Amino acid sequence: MNRREFLSTFAAACAVGSMTPAHAAQESLTTLSDGSFALPVNMLSSSADPARVRAALEAAGLSATEHRNPLNVSVLTRGDDVVIFDCGAGPNFMDGAGKLAENLAKAGIAPEKVKHVLFTHAHPDHLWGALDDFGTPAFPEATYHMAAAERDFWMSPEVFRQMPEDRQAFAAGAQRNLKELGSVLKVFKPGAEILPGVAAFETGGHTPGHVSFEVRVGSESLMVLGDALTHPVISFQHPDWRGGFDQEPDRAIATRRRLLDKLATERNRIVGYHLPGGGVGRVEKSGSAYRFVPA
Ligand SMILES: [Zn+2]
């Protein structure tokens, strides 16, 4: 089986874009894993009573002590070109993460086939895979794209004062990666169509310049969410709880509310970087809140 046949089979098995047979080999969107890491559940919300968090998790059949956080990198294949959304954590963040390179290789995608890398934001598990073990860009033929507001937030000397003690490394790592990318990093504003059929959608709050991407695949439109919705229970059933990793918690809550309403109305498929089962699903209204339905 050659690479094209493999990709075609792979697309048929896992692709989330709707495809006529004619499109099958040309355009698909799927996810590849960068691994996962463990989080104590008390880090899932900074405002909710821990007993309520545990109860919500237990009611959904999830562990009330540890959250296993998956990392899903969206991979858009168009003919021979590949576009990826975020690029994993790289080798220096946490045990269990940083597996994108090996999973791209298993999928038959050489690093130089990746022509564009689109960042939702600059947290370590999304950005630090931008550099390889030698500290040079991991995708040598790629142009990297990030919202200007996100780049500016992390590159400011003020950023260290805005991060808690235990997240100073987030800022140092962001500066190192963004500096090293140099001129291959391009910035955009939300609303811009960055590539044909790929537009940035403002979803700030998790970080100041966080964006999601509306992606047209064949006749389907999907939303690559990044971390606008991070947890399959907490983010959907309790969007008003402050997220444990949200830089601007109140703005993140407003963003979740607005986004959940839009997604439940439009019924388009979503891809969540940290959602289970590869991250693909839909949003449904459920009482006064919402639920994540894998699809
Ligand atoms: Zn993340």
Image (cartoon, helix red, strand yellow):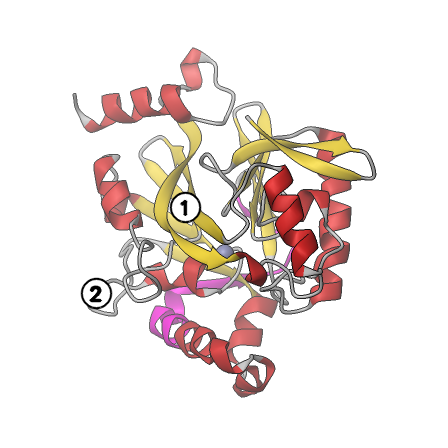
Q: Residues within 10 Å of mark 2 (few under 14, many from 20)?
A: few
Q: In the rendered structure, find residue 84 and report the number of the disc placed on it.
A: 1
* Left or right: residue 35 compared with residue 273: left
x and y, in percent, of residue 293 in the image: 61, 29
**Callout 2 secondary element:** loop
Q: Earlier in the sequence, mark 1 or mark 2?
A: 1
- Seen from the viewer's position, the closer of residues 134 and 72 is 72
* Placement of 23 over or under 103, stated as above or below: above
Q: Which residue in the structure is indicated by mark 2?
A: 133
Residue type pointed to by label 2: Asp
The stretch drawn in magenta includes residue 188: yes
Instruction: Tell me which residue sits at (39%, 56%) in the image.
Output: 143
**The residue stretch that appears in magenta:** 176-195
Front residue of 113/95: it is 95
Does the beta carbon of the residue at mark 2 sit less than 8 Å from ligand 1? no
Do we see residue 203 in this rendering?
Answer: no
Q: Is residue 76 above or below residue 36?
A: above
Residue 124 point in image, percent of width and height: 43, 65
